[in-house]
Each structure stands twice: as C-alpha cells, then as structure tokens.
Amino acid sequence: MRENMFKGLAAAAGAAVGLYFRELVIPVAVLVTVMILDYVTGMADAWAAKELSSKTGLLGIVKKLGYLIAVAVAVVVDWVIQSVAAKAGLEMGNFYAFGLLVTVWLILNELISILENLSALGVPLPEFLMKIIEKLKKTAEERGEGEHGK
C-alpha cells in the first residue's frame, strides 16, 4: 500500500514538473541519456587503456551532477526573468531560453566526448559527424552570448 502511494506521488510530481517545464523535459532527458553514454564510453576507454580508476570515475559522476546543477541555475535565471517581466506587466509566456541553451550546449559537449571515447576505442567514425557537432556547439555558444549582450 505504501509503495503504491509513493509511486503515485512520484508520478504526480513528475507529471507536474513535466507540465510546468514541458519545453525542457525532452532536452533534459536527452542530456541525462548522453551523460550516461559518455560515462560508459569513458569508462570503457579507460579500461581499454588500463587507466581505470575509481577516483576518476567518481569525479566523472560529480562532473555530471554539476551539469544538472548548471541546467537548474539556467532554469532559475529564466524563472527570474519571467517573474520580473510579470511584475513589470510584460507577459513572456513560457520563457526557457537560458535553460534550453545550456541543456543543448551540454548535450553537444557530451556527444563530442562520446565520439572521442569511441574513436579512442578504435571505432571508425566519419569526420563530418564531429565537424557538425562542433559547429552546432559553437552556434549554441554564440546564441547564448547574444542573449546576454556579449
């Protein structure tokens, strides 16, 4: 009975967060997925190079948690902008520009790392794929800098 109640509450909370941040749910889910893939391919690369270390692995997990904190900070920035705009009488709707930019930038960063890990393992990769991802990452950086006036 308690387990079902907990599952129900967790599902309701997840649905509420999903409705509130619906523009970010899929990008954040993709980010978590590529973070896991990067961690796994990084560990495989370290194992193949006989450099596997629990300390390095733990630091990798801490780094991934830092990514999620960075996304959370960007979402808070978006919320602050929405709140200030609402107080000024401006309706911005669902404004998640910074949260989305940070999430996309991190996804692209993780994809580059995955490709580097796979390459180190000897997986043949087309050069154009790395170039496209790096160009997308640079575009996300430039758009982010344009958002805050740099």
Image (cartoon, helix red, strand yellow):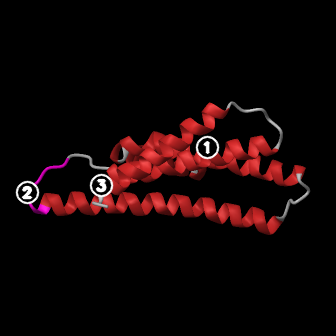
Determine the secondary structure under disc 2.
Answer: loop
Q: Is residue 72 visible?
A: yes
Instruction: Please state if 32 lies on the left or on the right of 93 as rendered.
Output: right
Q: According to the image, label 1 marks what residue?
A: 111
User: Of the residues shown, which amino acid type is indicated by label 1?
Assistant: Leu
Instruction: Please state if 71 lies on the left or on the right of 143 as rendered.
Output: right
Residue 82 included in the magenta stretch of the image: no
Residue 90 included in the magenta stretch of the image: yes
Position of residue 133 measured from the top left corner of the image (x, y, whole percent): 55, 39
Q: Are discs 1 and 2 less than 8 Å apart at CB?
A: no
User: Of the residues shown, which amino acid type is indicated by label 3?
Assistant: Glu
Q: According to the image, label 3 marks what residue?
A: 147
Q: Which residues are magenta?
A: 87-92
Determine the secondary structure under disc 3.
Answer: helix
Work out how far the residue at label 1 is from the one at label 2, CA to CA, in angstroms.
41 Å
Q: Are discs 1 and 3 less than 8 Å apart at CB?
A: no
Sequence-wise first label, 1 or 3: 1
Q: Magenta stretch mostly in which secondary structure?
A: loop
Q: Is residue 12 visible?
A: no
Q: According to the image, label 2 marks what residue?
A: 89
The structure residue drawn at horizontal position 32% and vertical position 61%, both measured from the top left corner, is 150
Sequence-wise first label, 1 or 2: 2
Q: Residues within 10 Å of mark 1 (few under 14, many from 20)?
A: many
Position of residue 2 measured from the top left corner of the image (x, y, whole percent): 57, 53
Q: Residues within 10 Å of mark 3 (few under 14, many from 20)?
A: few
Please state which of residues 103 and 136 is positioned toward the viewer in this rendering. 136
Position of residue 120 measured from the top left corner of the image (x, y, whole percent): 80, 45
Work out how far the residue at label 3 is from the one at label 2, CA to CA, in angstroms.
21 Å
Instruction: Please state if 19 lies on the left or on the right of 71 as rendered.
Output: left
Instruction: Please state if 126 lies on the left or on the right of 98 as rendered.
Output: right
